Amino acid sequence: MYSDAQLQDYLAGTLDIEIADALEEQIAIDPALESRLLALEHTQAGALRAVFDAVPTPERLQDLEHHVLAAKPAKPAPVRAQAPWQWASVAAVVAFAVGAYSFSAPPVEEKPAWRWQDQVASYQALYVTETLEAVSASDDQIANQLSKSEAALGRDLPLNAVGDLDGMKLLRAQILGYKDAPLVQMAYLTVDGKPVALCAIRPKAAVAKDFAFETLSGLPTIHWSDGEFNYMIVGDIDNERLMEMAQNVSTSL
């Protein structure tokens, strides 16, 4: 029969090699002895966790490492093959230490919440030439789409203002949504096949803003607000042309 003190020495790696070898042979055939050893191991792990009741810091972990390295056993422990369950114990201790350090690491700064312009640009970035080449709405269908868009948005979208965007014919008008606010997207295609979108949204609270350029999701954009509705034009075209489009839309709407 092995005492608790011997089992604790075994867990610490300081038990005499001959006794340790015999103990391992007995553990392999004695479930009760193995259970005692696991129970002691669990108790030791609980004591270790108690040390970290407070929020751990890298300094405390470094201090613990210093004390462990400084505590040299009176007699070097022999190197022996580890039983599978022992490897599991080592892994558990390592995982605990890594988790403690991770918990103490500075939090990663969260990215700011996306605006409606970011959402639109990320959606527009998925468009390719073929996306709009397949669209073939008739004049009556375009008129119907604009009528529904006007009703959802709460403002007129006259064909003479949005039907032609600097030489690009309106191919489709559809109703999307952002944070419970209707968002109308009007789609166009440049001569060389680049998708362009004119969008309008009526947020709960709008502030008048002048034209502003940004590159969102890799696409040049210009956006502005008249104090009631927010607008945006996005597409792979140069800023000068974007500004001309925005000014024409702003004047004609």
Image (cartoon, rainbow, N blue to C red):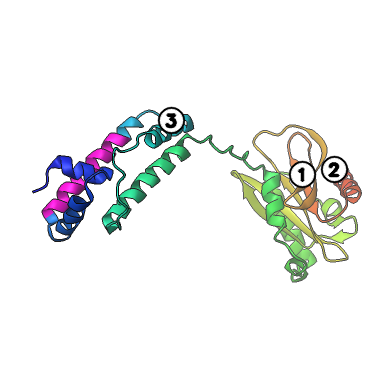
- Vertical order, 129 against 62 (above or below): below
Q: Position of residue 249 (x, y in %)?
A: 85, 47
Task: Tell me: residue 173, above or below residue 239.
Answer: below
Q: Is residue 142 left or right of residue 80?
A: right
Residue type at numbered disc 3: Asp
Q: Are marks 1 and 2 in contact (CB under 8 Å)?
A: yes
The location of residue 101, given as percent across then percent down, is: 46, 38
Q: Earlier in the sequence, mark 1 or mark 3?
A: 3
Q: Residue furthest top?
A: 54
In the rendered structure, find residue 63 and report the number of the disc placed on it.
3
Q: Is residue 12 left or right of residue 170?
A: left
The residue tagged 2 is 250
What residue is rendered at 88% in x and 48% in y? Answer: 239
On the image, numbered disc 1 is attached to which residue? 231
Side of 114 relative to 136 (left or right): left
- Residue at disc 3, secondary structure: helix
* Magenta span of residues: 32-48
Q: CA distance from mark 2 to mark 3?
A: 65 Å
Q: Nearer the viewer, residue 91 or 73?
A: 73
